[in-house]
Image (cartoon, grey):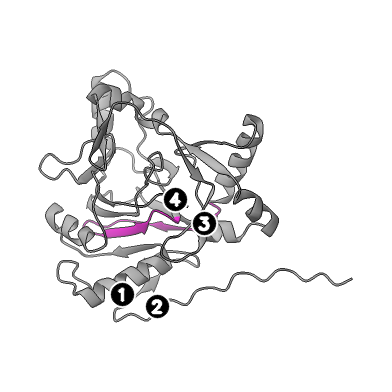
């Protein structure tokens, strides 16, 4: 008897665009040098979006954007949300969320505890603990260490495609519970209330999303669980859920699905939050690392 191995999914062809694109790995990530993000016409914005959809995360080095420029660029691709559901944005620019681990540690020290404040961040997909997680995020490097502080990204479409057809089919029947309480309950209790999509709340309620989601623009399927916010699989016993999630968390960030990027001041990064995870490497000691993020409103995963 002859057994024929299933065909691997055909690799999508990179879009033909009127600017230089430098791929950074075999599965995701590209750098786009030479553009001024303040002056792009509509045709170039459309080409950037096509490139972004293909590579999942794109980087624009050598930019000199203010927070206002940053927000204006983001608006070319969608509607900005609040900077973060729980943590307030900049006082004069609430849609801009500043990430500064040094400041976070100083604030924690004021309350007498820095044991849980890291200089990095483990693998996660942004804000999946709300009903409509973000479409994508656009980061601006403000102050970065000379060495360390890189960001890792992982392609969740590639991770799904690598699974056996039988496991793909099973996972597509499952629902995952996402919960932000472990990370943000203490902060929410301190500030009293959070805001998302114009609505205020005083408690973080778990939400449910499919374990496998279909991308609303490309139609491709990807894993949609992450160790930052996915707490369990609804249809399984706790022991089964824990075992399956542990496998998926490990599988989804295998080195061949990832790219690692070292920041320079001014670099802009734009990633598709619907098909990626990311993590921050906390290897920069006491050096300062300040990044600002604008988040784009997303849809309910299907």
**Mark pair 1, 4: CA separation:** 25 Å
Residue 242 image position (x, y, % from top left): 61, 35
Mark earlier in primary sequence (1, 3): 1
In the rendered image, the residue lying farthest to the top is 112
**Relative vertical location of residue 149 with respect to residue 15 in this rendering, above or below:** above
Residue 273 in magenta? Answer: yes
Along the viewing direction, whichever of 291 and 229 lies nearer the viewer: 229
**Mark pair 1, 3: CA separation:** 23 Å
Mark earlier in primary sequence (2, 4): 2
Mark earlier in primary sequence (1, 4): 1
Residue 79 visible in image = yes
Residue that badge 2 annotates: 15
The residue tagged with tag 1: helix, strand or loop?
A: helix
Point out the image quarter for the N terminus: bottom right
Residue that badge 1 annotates: 47
Residue 256 visible in image = no
The residue tagged with tag 2: helix, strand or loop?
A: loop
**Relative vertical location of residue 127 with respect to residue 136 in this rendering, above or below:** above
Labels 1 & 2 near each other (Cβ < 8 A): yes
In the displayed structure image, the side of residue 233 where residue 300 appears, left or right: left
Along the viewing direction, whichever of 278 and 75 lies nearer the viewer: 75
**Mark pair 2, 3: CA separation:** 21 Å
The residue tagged with tag 3: helix, strand or loop?
A: strand
**Mark pair 3, 4: CA separation:** 11 Å
Q: Which residues are magenta?
A: 253-275
Residue 146 in magenta? Answer: no
Identify which residue is drawn at 29% across, 73% down.
46
**Mark pair 1, 2: CA separation:** 8 Å
Mark earlier in primary sequence (2, 3): 2
Residue that badge 4 annotates: 301
């Amino acid at each position: 008897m002859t057994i024929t191995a299933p065909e691997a999914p055909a690799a999508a062809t990179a879009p033909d665009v009127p600017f230089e694109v430098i791929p950074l790995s075999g599965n995701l990530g590209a750098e786009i040098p030479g553009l001024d993000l303040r002056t792009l016409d509509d045709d170039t914005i459309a080409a950037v979006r096509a490139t972004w959809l293909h590579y999942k995360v794109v980087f624009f080095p050598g930019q000199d954007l203010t927070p206002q420029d940053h927000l204006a660029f983001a608006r070319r691709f969608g509607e900005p949300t609040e900077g973060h559901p729980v943590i307030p944005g900049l006082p004069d620019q609430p849609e801009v969320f500043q990430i500064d681990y040094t400041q976070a540690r100083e604030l924690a020290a004021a309350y007498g505890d820095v044991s849980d404040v890291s200089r990095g961040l483990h693998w996660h997909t942004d804000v999946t603990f709300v009903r409509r997680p973000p479409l994508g995020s656009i980061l601006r490097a403000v102050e970065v260490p000379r060495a360390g502080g890189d960001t890792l990204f992982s392609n969740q479409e590639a991770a799904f495609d690598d699974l056996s057809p039988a496991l793909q089919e099973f996972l597509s029947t499952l629902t995952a519970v996402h919960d932000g309480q472990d990370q943000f309950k203490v902060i929410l209790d301190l500030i009293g209330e959070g805001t998302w999509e114009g609505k205020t709340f005083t408690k973080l309620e778990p939400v449910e999303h499919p374990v496998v989601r279909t991308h609303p623009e490309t139609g491709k399927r990807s894993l949609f669980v992450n160790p930052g916010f996915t707490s369990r699989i609804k249809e399984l016993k706790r022991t089964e859920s824990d075992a399956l999630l542990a496998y998926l968390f490990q599988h989804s960030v295998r080195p061949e699905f990832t790219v690692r990027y070292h920041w320079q001041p001014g670099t802009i990064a734009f990633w598709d939050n619907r098909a990626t995870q990311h993590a921050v490497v906390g290897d920069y000691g006491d050096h300062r690392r300040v990044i600002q993020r604008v988040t784009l409103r997303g849809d309910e995963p299907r």
